[in-house]
Amino acid sequence: MDATSGIWDSNLDEEEAFSSSSPLLSESRGEKEVTMTTVVEIGDEKKRVGFDAGIGHEVSDDTAHQISHDPWYQVGFVLTTGVNSAYVLGYSGSIMVPLGWIGGTTGLILAAAISMYANALIARLHELGGKRHIRYRDLAGHIYGRKMYALTWGLQYVNLFMINTGYIILAGQALKAIYVLYRADDALKLPYCIAIAGIVCALFAFGIPHLSALRIWLGFSTFFSLIYIIAAFVLSFRDGLHTPARDYNIPGTHVNKIFSTIGAVASLVFAYNTGMLPEIQATVKPPVIENMKKALWFQFTIGNLPLYAVTFMGYWAYGSSTSTYLLNSVNGPTWVKMLANTAAFFQTVIALHIFASPMYEYLDTRYGRGQASAYALHNISFRVLVRGGYLIINTFVAALLPFLGDFMSLTGALSTFPLTFVLANHMHLKARKNKLSPLQKGWHWLNVVGFSCLAVIAAVSALRLIMLDSKTYHLFADL
């Protein structure tokens, strides 16, 4: 068996050790209720939670959010929402321009394949040692111990904080783009638009208690995504037909090209990965590994197609002059561009909630958990206070440093590389111990060392870009 084979083989000792549920039957007069129990890993502790077959979801005293509640296709749409968020409007400029046709196309395909493999490794470990690891840090703590639990939580927090900061920048850019369609006075600055976006994101966070509660909002998210992706694709195609020969040469000096290429590589891994796969997998109904497999295949096949379409079309139409927010490059009817930007704004609000959910879950579980309904007044008040404070910080940083492409590169470097690629391969090595062949061990170590080096190099490159942009545009820039 080669190093990459059998990633979904469920006949490993680790999975065999897991007893996902054991029925406890209790009969009452005229009715029978079946309750299932499963073990959930909460940090260093092992807790038992109940599964009520009548209502179809687990109810845990150790998390304030729902687990094992969602069908695989809902989880697939959660993953696809992240992949096809308004960030896709930036990939023509942030990935294709620095890498060119050959490098960009090859990079997008290879990054998808490697990301699928790494996410599959993480998904297989969800039931390691007979426990449900519903958080990334719980899985790391189970394998490595308490120190790695804390380090993983820190990395994940940085990852999700920067992703959410980027989302607020995106939403602010969409509002600014709508404003300039109708007014040329430049009175509404980007920092003001970012502040408005932060307020709307907070209002949405107050009303949606947890990830599973998104439900119909995932449908709206898909609808909004299709609006701005189709609009950007069609308008770019029309511009490309009527534009003279484009320049596809990679811009910049030799040194700048090197750093831009490194930053684009970080953006490649950022494009496909969430950094919170165990938290998303925690919401899926049993069998959790098999259902997560379906969700991942959905993401990396059908779910990636809109990303490819709009990224390649934008670069084809505008070449090296493509903006890092594609809707700023397109020409067309004002109402179409207004509609596309409005859709991008609202989709971003929904997508941010997904990537903020691990922090919300931590705060709700540790400080705000109550036995009443999630919509009880004291629970809503808690969300207003705590989530509002978290998003105020996000919004301030977004307005302070509104450099979207740089944030994508820095996020990929500091957290996506370590969480998705380095840890996934090393945890697999630790979990399977002596069950791997020398070839398989060599493959995983190659991934660990290679992606660790890439993470360091990409972080240096991203910080350099942020410093250069800060000198060029100043803080609270109106880009």
Image (cartoon, helix red, strand yellow):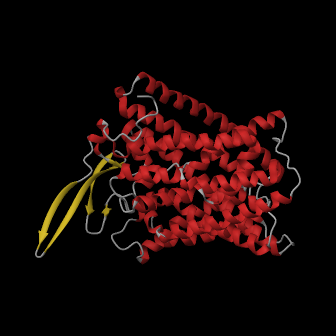
Residue at 51% across, 56% down: 79
Residue at 78% across, 72% down: 179
Residue 461's place in the image compared with 297, above or below, is above
Residue 24 at x, y = what percent? 17, 59
* Residue 379 in sight from this viewpoint: yes
The N terminus: image quadrant = top left
Residue at 47% across, 73% down: 381
Q: How many marks?
A: 0
Residue at 68% across, 67% down: 195
Quadrant for residue 332, please give it.
bottom right
Residue 240's place in the image compared with 126, above or below, is below
* Residue 464 in sight from this viewpoint: no
Q: Is residue 267 left or right of residue 325?
A: left
Q: Is residue 293 left or right of residue 446?
A: left
Quadrant for residue 313, please give it.
bottom right
Residue 398 at x, y = what percent? 68, 58
Residue 154 at x, y = what percent? 51, 46
Depth check: give the residue in front, 218 or 9.
Answer: 9
Residue 426's place in the image compared with 310, above or below, is above
Q: Is residue 286 left or right of residue 318?
A: left
Of all residues shown, which one is farthest toward the top? 438
Of all residues shown, which one is farthest toward the left? 29
Of all residues shown, which one is farthest toward the right? 244
Residue 437 at x, y = what percent? 39, 24
The C terminus: image quadrant = bottom right
